[in-house]
Image: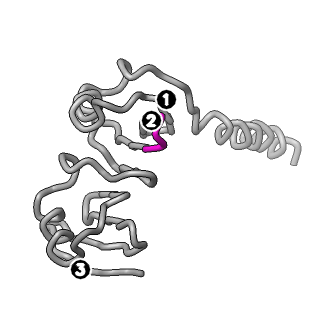
Amino acid sequence: MKRLTIILAPLFVALSVLPASAGNDRIITVGELPAASQQFISTCFKEVEVSYAKVDEEWFDKEYKVVFVDGSKVEFVRSGAWKEIDCKYGEVPAGAVSAPIRDCVAARFPGRRIICIERDRRNCEVKLDNGLELEFDADFRLVDIDD
């Protein structure tokens, strides 16, 4: 029994300390972002000042978040590709939205603005200024509308 306690005690200490070391957020400069992220910001948000940028380092992953002074936010994955663009007080820049999605929104919802877009490997979700949420598949076909 004593031997089991000696073995399990360090294990419990390690398991309690490990989660505390994960999820380290730290403020960084725009120059520390991946090159693809820097290029995206200089192309799509060139007239908007950056409030701050931060990196969230998990165990095997790294994500970046950039917040602008106008309230817009962009999240990037490790490679520098954008994951989510949230412009709740404005509109997602046209250059950030693929042409098939822009064309679909313009044709089916004229006059509506895209205020948030989020993508992953399988789909892309778009939120419009009227509260509608549109889901597109990997081939940019509209597959779901949620109000």
Residue type beneath disc 2: Phe
Circles 1, 2 touching at the beta carbon (< 8 Å): yes
Mark 1, Cα crowd under 10 Å, few <14 / some 14-19 / many 20+, is few
SS category of the residue bearing label 2? strand
Quarter of the C terminus within the rendering:
bottom left
Q: Nearer the viewer, residue 49 or 119?
A: 49
Which numbered disc covers residue 143?
Answer: 3
Q: Residue at x 36, y 49 (%)?
A: 85
Labels 3 and 2: the sequence-earlier one: 2
Which numbered disc covers residue 51?
Answer: 1
Horizontal and vertical percent for residue 130?
40, 72
Q: Is residue 62 visible?
A: no
Horizontal and vertical percent for residue 33?
35, 26
Labels 1 and 3: the sequence-earlier one: 1
Compared across the picture, whether 32 is left or right of 122 comes to right
Q: Which residue is mark 2?
A: 68
Q: Nearer the viewer, residue 42 or 106?
A: 106
Residue type beneath disc 1: Ser
Res 32 quadrant in image: top left
In the rendered structure, does residue 66 fall within the stretch colored magenta?
yes
SS category of the residue bearing label 3? strand
Mark 3, Cα crowd under 10 Å, few <14 / some 14-19 / many 20+, is few
In the rendered structure, does residue 137 fall within the stretch colored magenta?
no
Can you say whether 97 is above or below 16 in the image?
Answer: below
Q: Nearer the viewer, residue 6 or 141?
A: 141
Q: Residue at x 40, y 43 (%)?
A: 75
Residue type beneath disc 3: Val
